């Protein structure tokens, strides 16, 4: 018998044009909670999919209990006792909890193949009881909260008698209390002999649960460490690859007058009583854990969704914003979090992508001036230093970082006062990251007010003049850039109440 | 910024291979083939009057195909168009014959009715974005023809004034009014789709509706406008059709939605939205029209015609999907 | 259906229950206007008329469950009915049961073609079935050479089937009940049945759990075709003839019945019981309109209105539910 229940050696996974995993290693002991950390795009999710047989690695070997295995599809991995709880819950919303738990391995009568509902419901309820869940197995999945759905996913893993359970950012969308519940369940699973791979962004999760931590960066294996033996700083260096300060070219800018402010902004079910303001030349960080309601606040300001209460002021005047077009006409621009889904038309050239929001500028009486359009596309694409040959290069052919630059260029085309950047460096390589920070600095010095939504502590600390922290749909604190630290932000990001509102 | 700059060019490289591997060339070949076939079938085909007769035989439907192209570029579908034709026509007939409204006004009522039908589709679809266009227009398809049936029962309504039949039958010199109207409208629709900000936005919505919204495009306004316009154009078809037949019944224009959709789809406008060129749709309007006419020449029954058009529709969508499309790639909206 | 602990609140809030309430109110209203409505003859009439619709609605529910649509079924009925009638015309000795089997086979093949074009040809369902609707219809006229098969050309046994009784119940009703039981069992108690729901509820998740999506699609359209084939034989038995324009537009009624019965057009949601109730509601509308002096020419308009109203009400209900869920979230 090997020391490890699961071991992977030299795994390389190539997607068209990208090396998603480059010769990575991983070792998991029995009864261990092993944290897997790394920035967005470091290759963690791909790695999980290789283990669970969703993707097939081009190179490398995988051993289960010392024996080499090669899963051809997810079913084989499941049969071998590996279960994954994915980041985005892969549930069937219309079906009952029981069905979600047993999908693919229903209990059936021998011979007739009849599904034994009563047995399945009973067993599902038994599993839910073990997890101290407070809902019945006959409930429709879609009626449950995210935390409850996650519970169902765990119950599913248990029902398959999984020995290795992989959790991909399970706490991302959970509140503090729900996370605590999850920690307890995870520990219980470990105590019962399961081995757990826990992927997370949150240092909190790692310290609370894991004994070992493995770090990936830029698709590569960086190292494995004992959680007790590594400091926060060392871990950040391992994840980011350099001292964080050297990355951020934040210029000193004298702040101007207030441009945008929101007062008690609310949207039912997403956030409540959110107030903050941003000044000319200022970079305001809006941070908190994923699911804290930051994106929703920004989308509401931009008019994608409608507020249910509160006010928005632009240059001191109260404004009502009914849609993105109105927001843009007022001088508010928004860079959406998911650039492929909301930022770009992937099968269009970069030139047309850039001019899309400002077609008026290159047209007369609705007639597009081809030459003018190309020139504008070219100028802006060059301004953000996009790595492309012609303005016809398809957006889909660019790397993540260059795609992001194109989305930034779209904003530059409009005549804006306030720019909201939602996770601008998510899934972007290091070089492009630096370029984006540089552009941000330059924009701020030109007098734009910038709101940056980010979960990445280093860039929040490195780039922002002021930091607003949200938790569970409320503002839980406001810090000046120089007085902020990772610990102080995290403390506020996890605060349940807003007593200490700044 | 600053430092050394990369230079991005705006020059487009021209490739003969790309130029010839366009879906439209296949259409042109098909078009020529069908004309050769027709010319062999009838000695009276290959002259101006023969061609004009052939053209007049299907052109009224083509007016629906024009806005249908926009709807397909949006990635949506409208199968209520034929019912809109019937309803607009019936209301026009009843306005004139039963309500004593002058024909000039009745014509306007016809156009207004079609417009209203289209607006209803668009209104429901933009107010209830969760609903699929297929289902909503299926509902209105039954509703509109149902209302037509309710009004006229199994009767016909005719006896229109002389000048009304001129709408279809009349011509300037040799050229029918209808053909002139079609050419003007087709050019207008094509130019708007490919040369203006409006058309660009329609392509954007069809390619990625969410990103379009984030780019400040008023997606719902555009959708509403296009559905409404589709209604108006259906009413135009109703005018020509009623003028040709001299009377109207609730069951006219059966199956026109399939012809219109087939014309557009064969033209290389993808049902998944955001792709295609208007010129393809125009060529395929004539392909399908001449094909029908030619089959008519050899007395192929209308039943076989159903089979032919149905097969053409399915093949037009399926063939590019089957990866034969590598050879005749549907050209994407010219990407700049 | 499965036995559950009796839960009044759950029951009254369900789609099925509200439909039953609507049915009762509707029936009482019509009965007050015309007392012949609830007579035995009329009810028998109503049910035999609804039988074919409800069999088709079960198949259509499967199609809608996976987010598809099939508007070719009217033509499939005409085609397989005509094909079988032509066979019977030249071979009058064929027993009734064999006619049914033939009808089901031909219908299934039509459905298989639909499924293949949608799953393998990647043609969107509305286009594929719009095309096939016309192809099958054209083919019907073609094989019959534009003629129809009249009553005297059909075997007595088959014609007698529609009016015949078994244990005092009309044969057609028996066929329908058998179909309900088989498919209610299939969708609830077999793995394949559950896979249909899974595909409709979340295609991506279904892929991850190793379900062959194409196979499910083909299966569902084949079932739809098979049931259309079955109905085609009931049709020629009931009307004692096979005609080229048979069952034109029936797909609209079927889809309407499903929508009224609470089947979600975005997939994943729907029950056999709901579909049956939806059919009965539609059947009552069709049957009762003449009884309360509404012109039959109004039927289509009312039907169209009912479909649109039903989908809009479904949407509003869903929105209200979502909004209430949001409100419950503490912030």
Image (cartoon, coloured by chain):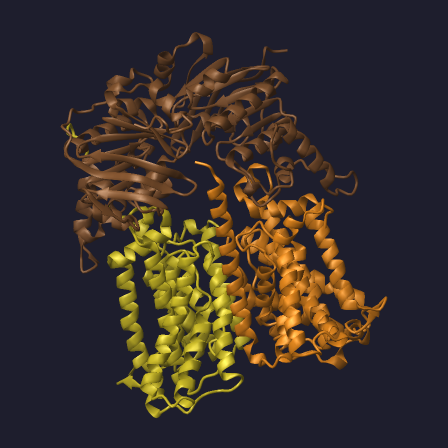
Chain colours: A brown, B yellow, C orange
Q: Is residue A170 above or below residue C10?
A: above
Count of residue discs: 0
Examine the image and state in which quarter residue A292 appears: top left
Q: Determine the residue located farthest toward the right in the rendered image.
A: C167
Q: Residue at x 54, y 30 (%)?
A: A85
Nearer to me, C140 or A472: A472
Q: Determine the residue located farthest toward the front in the rendered image.
A: A499
Q: Residue at x 32, y 90 (%)?
A: B163
Measured as percent of width and height from the top left, residue A218 is found at 37, 23
Q: Is residue A154 above or below residue B314?
A: above
Q: Residue at x 68, y 60 (%)?
A: C226
Measured as percent of width and height from the top left, residue A386 is found at 24, 35
For the question of whether residue A327 can be seen, the reply is yes
Q: Determine the residue located farthest toward the top in the rendered image.
A: A229
Q: Residue at x 71, y 35 (%)?
A: A122
Measured as percent of width and height from the top left, residue B22 is found at 35, 55
For the question of whether residue B59 can be seen, the reply is no
Examine the image and state in which quarter residue C264 appears: bottom right
Quadrant, the N terminus of chain B: top left
Measured as percent of width and height from the top left, residue A42 is found at 40, 25
Q: Is residue A244 above or below residue B40?
A: above
Nearer to me, B47 or C157: C157
Q: Is residue C238 left or right of residue C221?
A: right
């Amino acid at each position: 018998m090997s020391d490890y229940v699961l071991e992977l050696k030299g795994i390389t996974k190539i997607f068209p044009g990208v090396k998603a995993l480059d010769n990575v290693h991983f070792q998991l002991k029995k009864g261990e909670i092993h944290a897997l950390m790394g920035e967005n795009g470091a290759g963690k999710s791909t790695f999980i999919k290789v283990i669970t047989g969703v993707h097939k690695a081009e190179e490398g070997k995988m051993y289960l209990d010392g024996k080499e295995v090669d899963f051809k599809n997810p079913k084989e991995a499941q049969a071998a006792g590996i279960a994954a709880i994915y980041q985005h819950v892969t549930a069937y919303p219309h079906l009952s909890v029981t069905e979600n738990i047993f999908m693919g391995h229903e209990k059936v009568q021998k011979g007739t193949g009849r599904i034994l509902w009563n047995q399945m419901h009973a067993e599902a309820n038994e599993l839910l009881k073990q997890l101290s869940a407070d809902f019945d197995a006959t409930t429709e999945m879609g009626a449950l909260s995210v935390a409850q759905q996650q519970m169902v996913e765990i119950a599913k893993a248990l029902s398959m008698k999984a020995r290795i359970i992989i959790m991909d950012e399970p706490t991302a969308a959970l509140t503090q209390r729900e996370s605590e519940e999850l920690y307890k369940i995870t520990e219980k699973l470990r105590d019962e002999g399961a081995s757990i791979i826990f992927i997370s962004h949150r240092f909190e999760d790692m310290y609370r649960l894991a004994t070992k931590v493995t770090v990936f960066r830029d698709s590569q294996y960086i190292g494995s460490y004992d959680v007790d033996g590594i400091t926060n700083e060392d871990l950040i260096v391992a994840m980011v690859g350099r001292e964080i300060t050297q990355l951020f070219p934040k210029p000193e800018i004298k702040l101007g007058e207030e441009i945008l402010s929101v007062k008690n902004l609310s949207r039912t079910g997403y956030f409540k009583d959110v107030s903050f303001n941003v000044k000319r030349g200022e970079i305001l960080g809006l941070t908190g854990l994923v699911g804290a309601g930051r994106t929703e606040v920004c989308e509401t300001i931009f008019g994608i969704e409608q507020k249910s209460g509160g006010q928005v002021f632009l240059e001191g005047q109260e404004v009502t914003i009914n849609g993105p077009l109105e927001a843009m006409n007022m001088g508010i621009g928004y860079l959406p979090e998911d650039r492929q889904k909301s930022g770009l038309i992937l099968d269009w050239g970069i030139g047309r992508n850039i001019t899309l929001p400002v077609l008026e500028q290159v047209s007369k009486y609705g007639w597009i001036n081809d030459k003018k359009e190309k020139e504008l596309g070219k100028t802006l694409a060059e301004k953000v230093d996009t790595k492309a040959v012609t303005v016809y290069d398809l957006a889909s052919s660019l790397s993540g970082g260059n795609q992001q630059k194109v989305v930034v260029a779209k904003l530059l085309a409009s005549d804006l006062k306030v720019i909201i950047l939602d996770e601008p460096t998510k899934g972007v390589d290091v070089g492009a990251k630096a370029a984006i920070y540089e552009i941000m600095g330059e924009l701020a010095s030109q007098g734009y007010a910038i709101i940056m939504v980010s979960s990445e502590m280093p860039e929040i600390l490195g780039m922002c003049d002021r930091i607003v922290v949200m938790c569970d749909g409320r503002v839980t604190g406001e810090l000046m850039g120089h007085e902020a630290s990772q610990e102080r932000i995290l403390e506020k990001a996890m605060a349940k109440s807003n007593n200490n509102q700044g | 910024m600053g430092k050394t700059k990369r230079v991005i060019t705006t020059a487009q490289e021209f490739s003969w291979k790309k130029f010839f591997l366009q879906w439209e060339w296949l259409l042109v070949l098909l078009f020529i083939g069908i004309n050769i076939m027709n010319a062999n079938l009838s000695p009276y085909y290959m002259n101006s009057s023969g061609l004009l007769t052939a053209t007049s035989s299907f052109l009224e439907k083509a007016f629906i195909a024009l806005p249908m192209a926009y709807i397909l570029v949006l990635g949506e579908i409208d199968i209520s168009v034929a019912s809109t034709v019937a309803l607009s026509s019936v209301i026009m007939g009843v306005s004139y014959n039963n309500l004593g409204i002058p024909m000039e006004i009745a014509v306007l009522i016809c156009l207004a009715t079609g417009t209203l039908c289209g607006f209803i589709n668009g209104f429901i679809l933009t107010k209830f974005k969760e609903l699929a266009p297929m289902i909503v227009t299926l509902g209105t398809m039954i509703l509109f023809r149902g209302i037509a049936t309710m009004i006229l029962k199994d009767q016909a309504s005719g006896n229109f004034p002389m000048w009304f039949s001129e709408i279809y039958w009349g011509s300037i010199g040799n050229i029918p009014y209808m053909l002139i109207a079609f050419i003007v409208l087709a050019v207008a629709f094509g130019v708007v789709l490919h040369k203006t900000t409006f058309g660009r936005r329609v392509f954007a919505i069809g390619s990625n509706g969410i990103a379009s919204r984030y780019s400040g495009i008023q997606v719902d306004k555009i959708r509403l406008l296009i559905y409404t316009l589709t209604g108006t154009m259906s009413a135009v078809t109703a005018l020509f059709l009623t003028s040709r037949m001299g009377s109207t019944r609730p069951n006219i224009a059966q199956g026109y939605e399939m012809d219109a959709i087939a014309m557009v789809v064969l033209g290389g406008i993808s049902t998944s939205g955001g792709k295609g060129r208007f010129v393809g749709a125009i060529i395929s309007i004539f392909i399908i029209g001449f094909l029908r006419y030619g089959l008519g020449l050899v007395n192929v029954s209308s039943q076989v015609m159903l089979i032919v058009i149905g097969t053409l529709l399915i093949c037009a969508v399926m063939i590019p999907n089957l990866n034969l499309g590598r050879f005749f790639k549907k050209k994407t909206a010219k990407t700049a | 259906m499965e036995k559950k602990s009796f839960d009044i609140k759950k029951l009254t809030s369900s789609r099925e229950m509200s439909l039953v309430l609507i049915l009762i109110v509707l029936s009482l209203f019509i009965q007050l206007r015309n007392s012949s409505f609830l007579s035995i003859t009329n009810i028998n009439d109503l049910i035999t008329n609804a039988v074919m619709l409800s069999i088709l609605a079960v198949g259509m529910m499967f199609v809608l469950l996976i987010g598809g649509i099939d508007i070719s079924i009217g033509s499939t009925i005409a085609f397989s009915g005509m094909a079988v009638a032509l066979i019977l015309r030249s071979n009058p000795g064929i027993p009734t049961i064999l006619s049914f089997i033939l009808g089901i086979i031909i219908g299934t093949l039509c459905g298989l073609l639909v499924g293949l074009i949608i799953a393998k040809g990647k043609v969107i369902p509305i286009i594929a079935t719009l095309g096939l609707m016309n192809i099958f219809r054209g083919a019907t006229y073609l094989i019959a050479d534009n003629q129809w098969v009249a009553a005297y050309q059909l075997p007595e046994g088959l014609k007698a089937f529609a009016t015949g009784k078994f244990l005092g119940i009309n044969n057609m009703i028996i066929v329908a009940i058998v179909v309900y039981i088989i498919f209610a069992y299939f969708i609830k108690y077999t793995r394949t049945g559950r896979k249909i729901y899974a595909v409709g509820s979340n295609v991506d998740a279904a892929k991850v759990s190793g379900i062959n999506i194409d196979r499910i699609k083909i299966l569902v359209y084949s079932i739809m075709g098979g049931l259309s084939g079955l109905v085609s034989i009931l049709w020629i038995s009931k009307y004692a003839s096979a005609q080229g324009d048979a069952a034109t537009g029936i797909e609209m009624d079927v889809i309407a019945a499903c929508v009224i019965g609470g089947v979600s057009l975005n997939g994943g949601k729907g029950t056999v019981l709901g579909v049956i109730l939806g059919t009965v509601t539609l059947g009552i509308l069709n049957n009762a309109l003449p009884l309360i002096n509404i012109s039959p020419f109004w039927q289509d308009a009312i039907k169209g209105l009912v479909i649109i109203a039903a989908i809009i009400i479904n949407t509003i209900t869903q929105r209200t539910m979502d909004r209430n869920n949001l409100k419950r979230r503490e912030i």
